[in-house]
Image: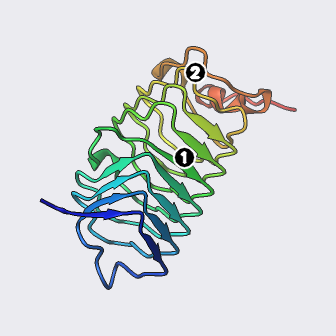
């Protein structure tokens, strides 16, 4: 039986030096906390908010994120594919998610807003109805990815090969069309 923490507020705590107690966290708020390189394996977070936190290079083996909001967080190099996928649901706003991996994950309807996703791995993932609102996708990898009904209208710097991904009803802006034609090495002038 693991510890249960309800409706708690954690602020400006360095969990790298003083590890968070392993357990289940429900309706908790983590503000300006440092989880960098922390081992969050086996933790359960339900309906929690992370604001201004650094979770870079944290270990996420079997970590449960259910109805989680990340805002203004630094989350470099995270391997979300190691998370517990039961009930997995999160949203990201104003986050740094460079070099993260969502390899093979089903993250339908996830919202990424004003988020940097450079070099992020979306290979073999199901991104049905995902919204990339004003997101930087420079070097992000899309291969055998389900992008049906995904919204890229305000995303930028992406390069997606339509022949290697399922893209039915995906939304793009006119300015984003070059990101779908990169493989042809053609020049497009505005």
- For mark 2, what is the residue? 149
Q: Which mark is residue 131?
A: none
Residue 139's disc number:
1
Provide residue 80's location: percent of width, then percent of height.
35, 49
Dividing the image into 4 quarters, which one contains the C terminus? top right
- Disc 1, disc 2: CB below 8 Å? no
Query: Height in image: 166 above or below 190?
Result: above
Callout 1 crowding tier (Cα within 10 Å): few <14, some 14–19, many ≥20: some
Q: Quadrant of residue 28?
A: bottom left
Q: Nearer the viewer, residue 27 or 91?
A: 27
In three-dimensional space, the C-alpha distance between marks 1 and 2, rounded to whole angstroms, equals 21 Å
Badge 2 density bin: few <14, some 14–19, many ≥20, Cα 10 Å: some
Outermost residue to the left:
1
**Which quadrant of the view contains residue 143?**
top left
Label 1: state its secondary structure: loop
Q: Secondary structure at mark 2?
A: loop
Report the coloring of the rendering.
rainbow
Mark nearest the camera among 1 and 2 is 2
Q: Residue furthest bottom?
A: 17
């Amino acid at each position: 039986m693991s510890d249960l923490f309800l409706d708690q507020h954690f602020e400006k705590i360095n969990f790298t030096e003083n590890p968070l107690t392993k357990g289940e966290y429900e309706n908790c708020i983590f503000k300006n906390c440092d989880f960098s390189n922390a081992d969050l394996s086996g933790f359960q977070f339900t309906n929690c908010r992370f604001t201004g936190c650094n979770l870079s290079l944290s270990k996420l083996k079997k970590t449960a994120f259910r109805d989680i909001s990340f805002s203004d967080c630094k989350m470099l190099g995270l391997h979300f594919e190691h998370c517990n996928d039961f009930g997995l649901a999160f949203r990201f706003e104003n986050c740094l998610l460079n070099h993260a991996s969502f390899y093979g994950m089903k993250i339908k309807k996830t919202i990424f807003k004003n988020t940097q996703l450079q070099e992020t791995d979306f290979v073999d993932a199901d991104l049905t109805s995902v919204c990339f609102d004003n997101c930087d996708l420079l070097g992000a990898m899309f291969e055998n990815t389900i992008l049906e009904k995904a919204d890229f209208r305000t995303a930028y710097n992406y390069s997606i090969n339509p022949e290697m991904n399922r893209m039915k009803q995906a939304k793009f802006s006119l300015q984003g069309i070059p990101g779908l034609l990169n493989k042809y090495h053609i020049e497009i002038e505005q």
